[in-house]
Amino acid sequence: MRTLNVNTPSHAYPIFIGHNVYQQPQQTLAPYIGKRAAIISNETVAPLYLPRLQAVLDALGCAYFSIILPDGEAHKNSQTLNMIYDGLMQHRAERNTTLIALGGGVIGDMVGFAAATYQRGAPFVQIPTTLLSQVDSSVGGKTAINHPLGKNMIGAFYQPQAVLADLGSLQTLPAREFSAGMAEVIKYALLGDADFLTWLENNMAALMAQQPDVLAQAVYHCCQMKADIVAQDEKEHGIRAHLNLGHTFGHAIEAEMGYGQWLHGEAVAAGMVLACRLSETLGYLKAADTERVIALLQAANLPVAPPRMPLDKWLAHMQHDKKVQDGQMRFVVLRAFGLADIAGQINTTQLQHALQPYLA
Ligand code: NAD
Ligand code: MG
């Protein structure tokens, strides 16, 4: 098991990563939960992983109750959030009752927001069960629900007491979801040191086969990178925005296709190819660099081209992105691998050039 410490200005906490995080609950759980806990999961994950967690809490002498929510991004809304509050109230949860999020990013984001707001803040522990949530959403303290008019629009920055990333739980994850998480892993490789990019190219096959040591190393490295970035910039005033590489284009793809058609990671994969093309347009990357990214994404069974749409549709979608500031679209581009930058002055001609092969 590997342990990583996240130090944000508001709170410091550990992330435990490995195939044996449940075997050492005195270390990984006991210090971070109170005498009572509320386990919040969904209909898909609970049958798979709730009994094991319950057994561990029993052994630790922690009293608990469970709230099981419907599965899916479509339920990441105020109605489902209310189901959490209802359960907490009905079971007379107190301010020191620990909320345990057992599931992927949807559960983590919703439970985190419930914890941030229940009695003005209850402790919570994240047990992410998807690759995406282990390398991305469980780290960094962003919590949210969706509003009918926009994704993640209602939320808070709120850090957990601890994160338990059990790599064994990824074995039941559908292959498409595993690949979608891998898109974010590849994102870290493009943002970070060249060694990790090369390592990923050499180890992608082993990673896709979920070889334990390789998987542990990849998840650890990504969490380390995100933790470093979040420690520097908890509330995204600067460098944290680099984590949005590929996301402005990706959000346009998700919006155009209807959320749920393309998984977020799939849209980010194609979005990163476009971010590379834009970086080429600006004279930063070479075509061969983009080809290298495409090969890596393909090795992870990810899409490398967006659906075709006309330029005005791209523009309309991207102008609605949360990252728009003062009406100006902002793109994360790569000056080189490992050297991201925010380009705020991209004009339509440059965008058209980057998107040319993909326009309808
Ligand atoms: P998800 O939570 O919907 O999980 C994907 C699917 O896999 C679901 O059907 C889920 O029930 C199922 N599942 C989860 N674990 C499983 C397992 N071990 N075995 C079998 N099935 C399993 O999706 P996700 O990709 O984990 O997270 C996406 C969400 O994360 C989005 O809502 C996004 O906004 C959010 N997010 C948040 C942050 C952040 O910083 N807070 C960052 C990135 C993404
Ligand atoms: Mg993302």
Image (cartoon, rainbow, N blue to C red):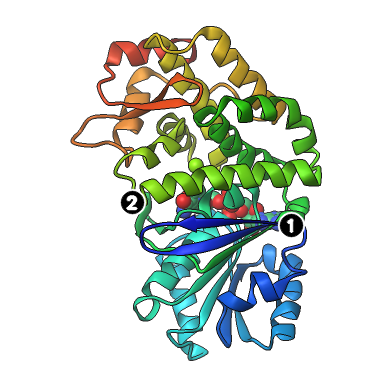
Is label 1's Cβ within 8 Å of ligand 1? yes
Q: Return the x and y of residue 79 as percentages of the image width and height.
A: 43, 69
SS at circle 1? helix
Q: Nearer the viewer, residue 252 or 222?
A: 222
- Depth check: give the residue in front, 244 or 338: 338
In the rendering, which numbered label is found on residue 235? 2
Residue 221, image x, y percentages: 61, 42
Q: Amino acid at mark 2?
A: Lys
| Residue 159 percent location from the top left of the image | 44, 63
Residue 360 seen anywhere in this rendered image of the structure: no
Q: Residue at x 35, y 49 (%)?
A: 150
Mark 1 or 2, nearer chain start? 1
Kind of residue at badge 1: Ser
In the image, residue 132 sits, relative to residue 106, either above or below, namely above
* For residue 97, above or below residue 109: below
In the rendered view, tell whether residue 229 sits above or below residue 75: above
At 27% across and 26% down in the image, what residue appears? Answer: 344
Quarter holding residue 239: top left
* The C terminus, quarter of image: top left
Image quadrant where residue 81 sits: bottom left
Distance in Å between CA atoms under marks 1 and 2: 30 Å
Q: Decide: marks 1, 2 in contact (CB < 8 A)? A: no
Direction from residue 25 to residue 308 in the image, left or right: left
Residue 246 spot, x, y in % from top left:
46, 30
User: Which residue is identified by label 1?
Assistant: 169
Q: Identify the residue shown where x is 27% and y is 36%.
A: 324
| Quadrant holding the N terminus | bottom right
Q: Report crowding for label 2: few under 14, some 14 to 19, many 20 or more residues within 10 A (C-alpha).
A: some
**Is 210 displayed left or right of 143 in the figure?**
right
